[in-house]
Amino acid sequence: MHRAEPGHYVAVTTGDEPFRAFVPAPLPPDPGVEWSAALRRRFDAALVALGRLDAVTGLLPNAALLLYSFVRKEAVLSSQIEGTQSSLADLLLYEIDEQPGVPVDDAREVSRCVAALEVGLKNLRGGLPLCTRLLCEMHKALLDHPRGRGKAPGEVRRSQVWIGGTRPGNAVFVPPPSEAVLDCLRHLERFLNDEPEPIPPLVKAALAHVQFETIHPFLDGNGRIGRLLIVLQLVADGVLREPMLYPSLFFKTHRTLYYELLNEVRLHGDWERWLDYFAEGIETSATQAVATANTLLRLVDGDRNRIARLGRAAGSALEVHGALQRQPLSTSATLVKATGLTPATVNKSLVHLERIGIVHELTNRQRGRVFSYRRYVEELAAELEPAG
């Protein structure tokens, strides 16, 4: 099959150096993707896995607690792809105003990734479609930290960027010149909203991710916004009720292939290999998310049964236990705020929970102690980093 060019190059000069920048053709690919039987099966399997994950959201009484943790897991993974050193525990410590084990700037960057997704969801549920304005609002939230404030938060870039190398002339890839970016985004926006024709949601998410990364519309943060766009697209199109998916685990595990396949689309229009990789990643990620959810729920149910045997202390201890599922690293003060219980009641509950091995105190200090729902944190972070 003849494959049309995936885009075209334009001659650009920055300073005294001429180079070529790539402007992608609008989506969908023309001619269309060549759907082999194997590729169709791959997408069918990914959709089945997403259906199972969405069922978890719909059936579980405490899905909101899992969502809180899963969103943070995706933020940690996506940020690690970009080079931050923050672990899940570092992020959780930062969120309760405790010192993480890495530079605070790294943990702060990950927390802004969480904020960017929350801004995207809020806008989406407030009636704003997936569009350039929504992406800019997310980008503004993402770069709202000292490292990002000089990189035009919330603004489409007005200068040339490049990927790899020391300058555009020796770069691995040079995205479109700044004057072409808004036009590229307009085409992407139409595609995201099924113009001129509807595209199956999972296929749309796969194609749109490559297109966004190729346009590279911001001075910084493109990778993280582009990966958040995958989950937002699936929520916008009703495939997932909540962003319980963390695809960055697969992308991080197979990072070299991830970048290689993005380039193969740009160079040769090889959408089929990218789509196969993407669907495998979604199936793997959704299956892992379901398994993690079930493991955490078994743990929580077992611990709840143990707490119920505490007698008169059980009621308050169960409330503290519930709050720990949302913030599995907490101080007594954060638990007081989360539960509405008195400090004395929270502290007594923590003593009971520590005695039966559910909670562990981490700081070994008298004031401002940090308590860990340790097995919950270990299960949640098992795929991210070695336990402990």
Image (cartoon, rainbow, N blue to C red):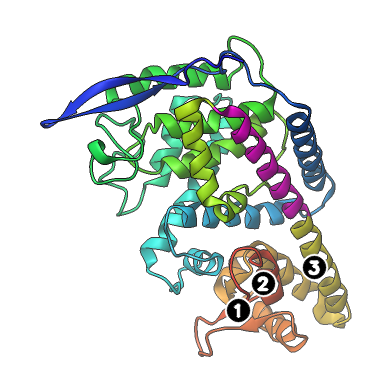
Q: Magenta stretch: give its range.
A: 270-290
Asked whether the viewer can see residue 119, the reply is no
Q: Residue 137: percent from the left, percent from the top?
A: 43, 35
Q: Tell me which corner region of the image, top left, top right, bottom left or bottom right, holds residue 35.
A: top right
Q: Amino acid at mark 1?
A: Gly
Q: For the point 65% across and 63% down, which residue is it?
A: 383
Decide: marks 2, 1 in contact (CB < 8 A)? yes
Residue 149 in sight: yes
Verify CB contact (< 8 Å) between mark 1 and mark 3: no
What residue is shown with label 2?
Answer: 378
Give the label on residue 300, or none: 3
Left or right of 155, for residue 205? right
As measured in the structure, the alpha-carbon distance from the residue carrying label 2 to the one carrying label 1 is: 7 Å
Q: Is residue 274 magenta?
A: yes
**Amino acid type indicated by mark 3:** Val
- Front residue of 171/388: it is 171
- Residue located farthest toward the left when viewing the structure as drawn: 16
Query: Camera-side residue: 114 or 81?
Result: 81
How many residues crowd mark 3 within 10 Å: few (<14), some (14–19), many (20+)? Answer: some
Residues at badges 2 and 3 in contact (C-beta under 8 Å)?
Answer: no
Question: Which residue has dot 1 on it?
Answer: 388
Q: Main secondary structure of the magenta part?
A: helix
Residue 315 drawn at (x, y percent): 81, 73
| Viewer-nearest residue: 217 or 275 | 275
* Residue drawn at 73 percent across, 54 percent down: 288
Q: Quadrant of the C terminus?
A: bottom right
Q: Earlier in the sequence, mark 2 or mark 1?
A: 2
